[in-house]
Amino acid sequence: MIKIEKLHKSYPIGKDSLHVLKGIDLHIKEGEFVSIMGSSGSGKSTLLNIVGLLDIHDKGDYYLNGELIKDLNEKKAAILRNKFLGFVFQSFNLISYKTALENVALPLYYKGMSRKERLKVAMDYLEKVGLKDWASHLPNELSGGQKQRVAIARALVTNPKVVLADEPTGALDTTTTDSVMDLLKDINDEGMTVFVITHEEEVAEKSKRIVRLRDGIIISDTLTKAAKAL
Amino acid sequence: MKFLFDSDTWQEIYGSIRKNKVRTGITIIGVLWGIFLLVVLLGAARGLENSFNKAFGNFATNSVFVWTQSTDTPFKGFQKGRRFRLNMKDIQVLKSEYADEIKLLAPRNQTMNLIVKDFKSGSFKVSGDFPVLDQIQKKKLIYGRFLNQNDINSSAKVTVISEDMYKQLFEKDEMPIGQNIKINSINYKVIGVYEPSNTIDFDGDTAYIPFSTFKKVYNTANNIDWMMITANEAIDIEQMESDVLLTLKNLHKVHPEDERAFGSVNLGKEIAKFTGFLTGMQFLTWFVGIATLIAGVFAIGNILLITVKERTKEIGIRRALGATPKSIRQQIILESVFLTTVAGMIGIILGATILMIIDTLFGQGVDATLVNPTVNIPIILAAFTTLVVLGTLIGLIPAHMATIVKPIEALREE
């Protein structure tokens, strides 16, 4: 599903450049539930952004769903994101003046689905995350956990190949963290590839595979207890 | 083009406008003011033009008036400062020499006299005229008729008076036709009453009597005070004016380069001055209106640019969810076009309303200053199209700004 070979990325800072990713090799198969762990500055967010086609890498190869990602223009990237990827952000990134339902339906709008149809699909997904009754609420009327579940519903609504979650629990308390992670786990159990970035050990333990990054290189790649138990 | 008729597109625009009500309102007012000014100024300019046209309307605009003053150059033994008068011989010479050029020629004699009717009286101008005057300076008669050739031939003691004179001299609802009034103690029968002219009028309230009668009563012999000449179509009126003056100078032994001996007014030339003034005013109107419009459109561009800056994050989210740069651009441009269109329409409606009010306040009655202040539909459509085109162009800038930022940078924005 995701195949990365010798991936390099650096950012220019003034005259110098900061080498963030120093040759990453990573292969994620369909249906996996992978956590990327690492302290801040380890390059995990950069990795996710590159995987999510929000940023471009300098060197190395990146295959998404078997397709080599190279010289992508914005239009192509947008279409690929819409088709293959679902995003969940730490700060939820819901559009403040749209209701929960409209937020969930937005990716389908860019897919070109009719309004009636996409509101129906969006409602199904809201139901799936247990927020059917909150469909007509604006994001500021929802709790953090609810917001993140709306965001997850939005990530799933296009039925993507991979869900990319960047610190999905970073802004949540312990209880809601568990419920959000359980939700991601359920999704994974249904066969969805889930790619989570976190720095919380307990969160990572919920996934099946933990990849640890430090200073732009992978230092360990292990299966979790949860995966071994299967 | 499909996206134009997509209810979702409009829902998105409605959402973003609703989010910034005040700012959107102020922006709209900017453009609205521009097109409003354009409409009102153009309408007012048109109204002024119409009232000028109306003022000159009943008068033959290819007219020249000629009278005598005093010479300023000694010539053929005469000293300078000599006074002289036009006479009927001049008229005959002009008529025969300029048969092709001159269409109408009206010699005139005028004086002021006391006019008495029973116990009422007033001092008015008395004018000895030929029926031809009616063709040069159209008289609208309320009662009776104007002078005719029979009156001239028989030197009849008849007169045509103005409505105001009638009101001053007669009892209310008294029939004036056939009644006698005394002009300089001589009885004249009133044969017509004319309406005051609502256009330019060189006579004012005048009692018109036959030229031949005037000649006898006031003992003017063959002399005349002045004359009105109108030219045939396609005749260069200025050329005719100078030719006529030269002939007259020759007849009266005046130096050909004497500037003072004859006074003349060329109505066409005077009107051209006004027309030039009107053209200048219209140019100014357009300039001010369009400049204001452009300022308004820039305001919209500016606001959209700020909006885009503020919405960078939202645009980033949308792009992460699969919005193509094209769809982002379309939305911002459409927003710009939509705002300019709405503002333009409101501006036109308001402008038209003001013109209606101007019309009721200043556009009615005989002495209206702004007659029928209107703006042509094609002009409005052109201004409107310009507005929409400018709105599109100016929308391109924020639209471009929105899409050059990488989605990841847009998302980082707080």
Image: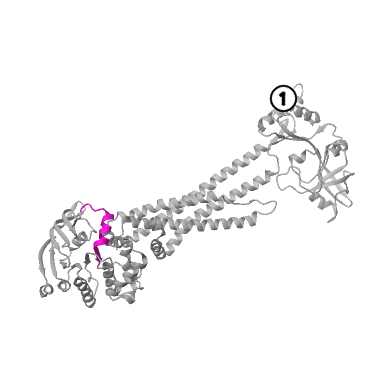
Question: Is A18 located above or below residue B218 in the figure?
Answer: below
Taking the view exactly as shown, the residue that stands out farthest to the top is: B76
- Chain where mark 1 sits: B
Question: Is B6 located above or below residue B230 in the figure?
Answer: below
Amino acid found under the numbered disc labelled 1: His
Is B117 on the left or on the right of B321, as rendered? right
Return the x and y of residue A87 as percentages of the image width and height: 25, 65
Q: Write down the quadrant of residue A67 in the picture.
A: bottom left
Return the x and y of residue B306 as percentages of the image width and height: 37, 58
**Residue A127 versus residue B125: which sits nearer the camera?**
A127
Q: Write down the quadrant of residue B110 in the picture.
A: top right
| Secondary element at tag 1 | loop
Q: Would you say residue B141 sits in the magenta stretch? A: no
Return the x and y of residue A208 as percentages of the image width and height: 14, 70
Is B349 on the left or on the right of B172, as rendered? left
Quadrant where the C terminus of chain B sits is bottom left
Residue at image coords 37%, 56% = B330
Is B406 on the left or on the right of A208, as rendered? right
Tag 1 residue: B255
Which residues are the magenta region? A70-89
**Residue B69 versus residue B146: which sits nearer the camera?**
B146
Q: Would you say residue A72 sits in the magenta stretch? A: yes
**Residue B211 versus residue B387: which sits nearer the camera?**
B387
